[in-house]
Image: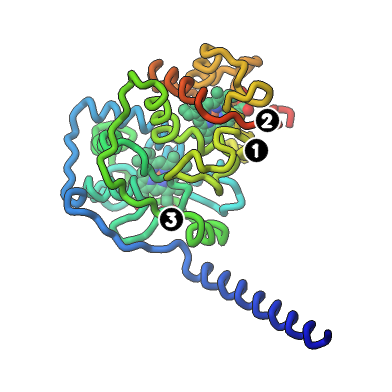
Amino acid sequence: MKRALKIIGILIGLLVLAVGGFAAYIALKGIPHYPVNMPAEIASLQVPRDSVRVARGAKIATLLCNECHRGKDGRLVGIIMADVPKEFGTIASYNITQDPVHGIGAWSDGELYYFLRTGIRKDGSWAPPYMPKFPLMANEDVYSIIAWLRSSDPILAADLRENPPNNPNFLVKFLSNTVFNPPPLPQQTIAIPDTANQVAFGRYVADALCACYGCHSADFKTMDIQTPENSAGFYGGGNPVLDKEGRTVPSANITIDKETGIGNWTQQQFYEAVKFNKNPRGGPLYYPMFPHTTLSDTEVNAIWAYLQTVPPIKNQIKRFALSD
Ligand code: HEC
Ligand code: HEC
């Protein structure tokens, strides 16, 4: 008996040492670096900066980039993001204006493409999960973002401001060394599905382009960006996302469950909620839900069609109210 206790004691001791050692290793290692394996056709990529691509890129940016990178004066100079959960430490986005030193003016199109897909920069450093990666986005849409980043949009004009200080904490380092890895480059060219196939097109807009499921699943920590439907609580809501004052605004269940989701909504109610943040119960929908005014009617209606095919989840959300 005594001997068994002693062995158990030693085992526990070893376990504590191993856990402590792993923690110290992660704290020292920080955010991992990765080898840069850029295929020749990406290294030499040159995206035409035509007005159609620039306009499409600007539209995507209003949905995907500006909210995180926009300073008080509207320029994309990077900010300390008050709406990143405190459990991740103090997180800042970066200056992505065209200044070659303080911004991304010196990056090649290929470097931007590789970074947007994988999060890996040319020096091998990796952007942690709070900078999204876009492994499922159509090539044309990634090209459009790049064309826009090079455009004369005034919010991108070269700006000398330094990146705000960024202090990811142990949890970010831990997650970046364990659960989250750079997604691989797509093996084939990804095309935008035909709008005639409403469900496939809606799935593309919701999952690959706007990543609606990220906020609308259980938690960012269990989000699966390569296979979105494997994210815990896919579209069942409850992710405790924050507003700009740091208050928790749980995301809504937007599966078609009739009791706890949007199964009793009309298509028009959905359209007005997504496009204009109108809450059919009265009043607005609260940030970080934002009005997706730049989505076309075809796109919003396709998301609706797609959501009809997503398995319903019963999950009653305690909604944010201003009096909370
Ligand atoms: C949820 C917030 C968020 C969104 C949305 C977002 N970013 Fe970022 N971005 C960040 C953060 C935070 C960093 C800093 C990452 C790091 O610490 O390595 C960053 C870094 C970058 C960098 C690297 C800059 C450098 O100097 O290393 C580029 C380029 C970039 N973002 C472009 C974009 C584009 C283009 C979009 C839209 C398609 C976008 N970001 C959307 C938060 C965001
Ligand atoms: C940055 C996080 C975020 C993103 C991205 C996001 N949402 Fe939301 N959404 C929320 C939050 C939080 C709420 C709840 C707001 C509230 O309670 O007032 C919400 C509410 C909603 C509602 C209202 C549901 C209800 O029961 O009131 C709909 C519909 C909706 N979102 C659809 C979408 C769609 C479609 C997309 C993608 C095009 C999307 N959302 C992207 C965070 C987000």
Residue at image position (56%, 30%) is 311
| Number of numbered discs overlaid on the protein picture | 3
Note whether 310 is above or below 169 in the view shown.
above
Give the label, 2 or 3, closer to the camera: 3
Name the amino acid, label 1. Answer: Thr
**Ligand 1 sits in which quadrant?**
top left
Residue 82 appears in the rendering: no
Where residue 277 appears, as percent x and y from the top left, is: 54, 21
Residue 11 appears in the rendering: yes
Residue on which disc 2 sits: 320
Give the label, 3 or 1, closer to the camera: 3
Pointer 1 with pointer 2, Cβ within 8 A: yes
Callout 1 secondary element? loop
- Give the left or right position of residue 23, taking residue 54 as reference: right
Name the amino acid, label 3. Answer: Asn
- Dot 3 or dot 1, earlier in sequence: 3
Residue at image position (30%, 30%) is 192
Where residue 7 appears, as percent x and y from the top left, is: 73, 84
Residue at image position (40%, 51%) is 163
- Dot 1 or dot 2, earlier in sequence: 1
Q: Nearer the viewer, residue 102 or 219?
A: 219
